[in-house]
Image: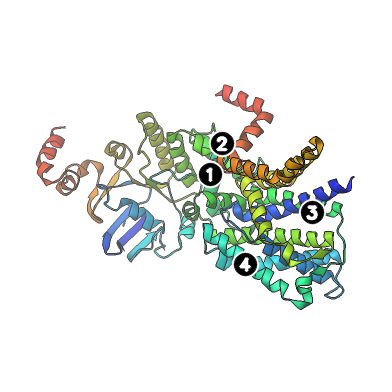
Amino acid sequence: MSGYLESQLIILCLSIIYAYGIFLPAASGQLNLGAAGFITLGAYASGWINSSDGLGLPLPISLLLAVLFTGAISFAIAFPILRTRGVYMVLATFAFAEVVSGLTINMEFLGAAAGMPVDAHASLIVLVVAAIGVILFSFYFMSTRLGLALRSIHDDESVSVLFGVNVRFAKVAAFTAGGMLMGLGGAMYGHHYNYIEAQSFNVLLSIYILLYVLLGGTQTAWGPLIGAIFFTVVPELIRNLAIEIGSTWLADSRFIFFGGFIILMMVVRPEGVVTRTMQDRVASIFTGNRRKNASEAE
Amino acid sequence: MTDNVLTISGIHKSFGGLQVINDVSMNVRRGSRTALIGPNGAGKTTVFNLLTGVYPIDEGTIVLDGTDVSHVPSQDRVIHGMSRSFQNIRLMPHLSTIENVMLGQHSRARSIGSLMFPLGLLCRNRWRLEAEQALQDSGIGTYPGEVVANLPYGVQKRIEVVRAMVSQPKLLLLDEPAAGLNDIETRQLQELLEKVSASGVTILVVEHDMHFVRNLCDHVVVLNFGQKIFEGTPDEVHQDPAVLEAYLGSDDTQTAKETSDAS
């Protein structure tokens, strides 16, 4: 495999893991713009636990502890943050990410502004396995009764309450699970590149990940997968196309086209690329005959 | 002593300075089909919201099948055996019919094990089969996988009833179930509700369509300006002067009375 393809695949795996971390709470209508904060927590936690200057524990244990650590922090901040809604939740989670960034950059034992080298290396195959694991987990999670409750909360919170859904519990669970996934993603990032600095996990990253999810669609677990693939692959495709036709102008201005395309998507498909109805329609192509028979039998 | 599934005693509710429910007491007999009627703004839906805990009551008690639920949190009242439908359809638009019905089962599946059970992955699990059966029994088994937003209004109204029923309530609260339905849909709804009633569930229904109330209900409670002004059978309600005045105004009471006597 060429180095270029491998580097793109790595970015894709990380994007997918991050995207599902934002998707789980987004499925119940929570907008989390704090991805960079959770990723920082996971990356530094795993890096420090694994490092000989830190605890010096082996990679699998440092990964697990980093995920649990990010989960614990997510759980703790879920209670104040989930009191906010909509745009205020966006602001609250953004503020959280800024706090994490500000703290990390001032901690000497984490290398402060100079960043931190990470010892153990995670190869591409580890990242692919992790990404597939995250996808499978998310599909399972959304198919459970808790997942059904989260989608119900998204549609109508007050009616969900009347049918016995513990809204607080469901939202905290989704927020915490999402935080853990992003912690895993951050840890994977650190162990793959073997160097982390707080500045690289900035608000632009948070915005991109939230966009993957919102443009991919929050109604089904396919949304973040499609969104992450789209955002990672399309700019590269335009770049390759530009090289192919020898246009430096297109190569330089590819993000203008990409941006225009995003706006178009928001106009044409405001609920995301993959909606519930679309999933049903695609599914009926495969089970089309059966359904036709059923309607004829009526 | 009669066997009451619901006993409301002296409940009060005001929003700011506005007294919306003023000292309402009523009993709902087990197995009965009781109607709660009254002019617009009489406080019928507010009574439902107080019963289900959407708003807290200011005073009084609500006893459901022997348990005082006056201050039980909204999300737990369904466990005590009370489930409802809504005046404007409140199905989850992005969920399929079967998923909406499975949401109704939530109160019976609140343990961690049940919450983490993959309903959507396994096609033949007992929750899904039960929900399919409930739809089948109600004569709307044809569109389990369809997103509800695309279904006809009358079907959506009936799905709301099924969703409320799968929580296995003792008392089913229906807020204007027949509003906006045509004659055929109303008849289908009535058949469904008669089936529900025959299965032993008590029905309390808010409704404007007096024809529907007469056909379905055996007991009527009339509210006006947040106060109970009448309680009796559907036949008696047409003869009561206070009710006629509330609905028609005092000038017309005499004429209305004559008409109803004549008919």
Amino acid under label 2? Pro
Q: Earlier in the sequence, mark 1 or mark 2?
A: 1
Q: CA distance from mark 3 to mark 1?
A: 33 Å
Q: CA distance from mark 4 to mark 3?
A: 26 Å
For label 4, count other residues whose C-alpha is less than 10 Å away and answer few (under 14), some (14-19) or many (20+): many
Q: Nearer the viewer, residue A276 or B203?
A: A276
Q: CA distance from mark 2 to mark 3?
A: 35 Å
Q: Residue at x 72, y 72 (%)?
A: A105
Q: Nearer the viewer, residue A125 or A174?
A: A125
Amino acid under label 4? Phe
Q: Which mark is residue A96?
A: 4
Report the side of A7 relative to B103 (left or right): right
Q: Which mark is residue B100?
A: 1
Q: Do the residues under discs 4 and 1 have CB atoms within 8 angstroms?
A: no
Q: CA distance from mark 1 to mark 2?
A: 10 Å
Q: CA distance from mark 4 to mark 1?
A: 35 Å
Amino acid under label 1? Asn
Q: Quadrant of residue A34?
A: bottom right
Q: Earlier in the sequence, mark 4 or mark 3?
A: 4
Residue A167 in percent (x, y) is at: 54, 58
Chain identity of mark 4:
A
